[in-house]
Amino acid sequence: MVQAVLRDWHTAPIDEKLRLMLGFLEKVTLTPAEVSSSDVQPLLASGISEQAIEDALIICAGFNVISRIADSLDVAIPSPEGFARTGEALLDHGYV
């Protein structure tokens, strides 16, 4: 399912609450000046808690900052194989 979400979260077989949250976070990321309290109402109406919305926004903000810093410093993105090697090394040796 992860691959389906990465390919296109709009059509991936995911829970509707997750789809709503991803749409909201996409708007926050791509057009933040257009976000208003009315964008939160569908999330709340679907049963997503205010805490979950806040948590998602904090995580989104963190990734947005990291992405912008990486772009400004022209950080090279590893290939899928490079990510896999890094993941294996972290599993074997940890972060320190």
Image (tube, rainbow, N blue to C red):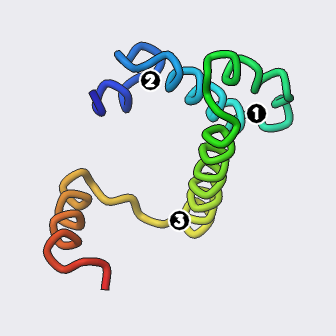
Q: Nearer the viewer, mark 2 or mark 1?
A: 2
Residues tagged 3 and 2 counted as in contact (Cβ below 8 A): no
Query: Where residue 19 appears, x then y in whole percent?
Result: 51, 21
* Mark 2, residue position: 9
Residue at 59% in and 28% down? 21
* Mark 3, residue position: 74
Answer above or below: position of 32 versus 59.
above
Q: Amino acid at mark 1?
A: Thr
Disc number at residue 21?
none
Q: Amino acid at mark 2?
A: Trp
* Mark 1, residue position: 31
Q: Nearer the viewer, mark 3 or mark 1?
A: 1
Per the image, label 2 sits on a secondary structure element best described as: loop
The 10 Å Cα crowd at callout 2, few under 14, some 14 to 19, many 20 or more, is some
Which quarter of the rendering shows the C terminus?
bottom left
Per the image, label 3 sits on a secondary structure element best described as: loop
Q: Nearer the viewer, mark 3 or mark 2?
A: 2
Question: Mark 3 to mark 1: distance in Å?
Answer: 23 Å
Which quarter of the rendering shows the N terminus?
top left
Mark 3 or mark 1: whose residue is earlier in sequence:
1
Answer above or below: position of 12 versus 62.
above
